[in-house]
Amino acid sequence: MNRYLIVVDMQKDFIDGALGTREAVAILPAVEEAVRAFEGTVLFTRDTHTPAYLDTQEGRNLPVVHCVRGTEGWQLAPGLQAFADARGCRIFDKPTFGSVELALFLAESHRASPIADITLVGLCTDICVISNALLLKAALPEVPIHVRAGCCAGVTPESHANALRAMEMCQILVEES
């Protein structure tokens, strides 16, 4: 059975750029190690906006321009990009918090060859990680969905902890490391 690791939005703007945090910087080595050690398929998501971001609903609610396609802030962390390039990993560009395209891809993959489990790591626990975890749980209700808490960071430590609790309530398996 196939196993998947989903690396959510480990991009410069979320690590140490426009929306970066100390916590995001701190998890980068753990995420890089998780990617290197994972035995299965690694997929990446990349938050992707246009220069007209501030004119979108998200931009009006979060008025910080970030992850504009082609900019430095949109890029994956260098070590993760090098891994993705070397392994030919698929990257899902997403214009919003969750990737419907990723969920559909994994649902189709599951029909073709059963998925044993899916693990998520990345940023931000309380926005994009939880959104993708819930989309995947809805698309694949019998596939165990894991989130590695030590490889995630939220907008704040409190919102990170709240998101982990919310995911646990939705039968997503939260692991410490």
Image (cartoon, grey):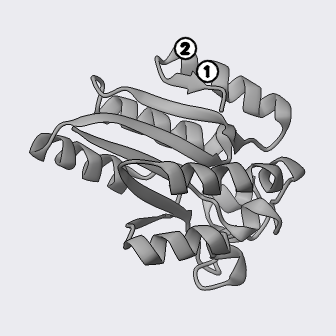
Mark identifier at residue 169: 2
| Residue 143 in view of the camera | yes
How many numbered discs, if any? 2
Residue 24 in picture, x, y percent from top left: 78, 52
Residue depicted at x 39% and y 48%:
39
Residue 162 in picture, x, y percent from top left: 72, 24
Q: Image quarter for residue 89?
A: bottom left
Residue depicted at x 47% and y 49%:
6
Residue 148 in picture, x, y percent from top left: 60, 35
Which quadrant would the N terminus be assigned to in this image?
top left
- Amino acid type at circle 1 is Ala
Which quadrant would the C terminus be assigned to in this image?
top right
Residue depicted at x 61% and y 64%:
56
Q: Is residue 176 above or below residue 35?
A: above
**Proximity of marks 2 and 1: CB atoms separated by less than 8 Å:** yes
Residue depicted at x 14% and y 43%:
113
Describe residue 51's horizontal placement relative to residue 170 as left or right: right
Mark identifier at residue 166: 1
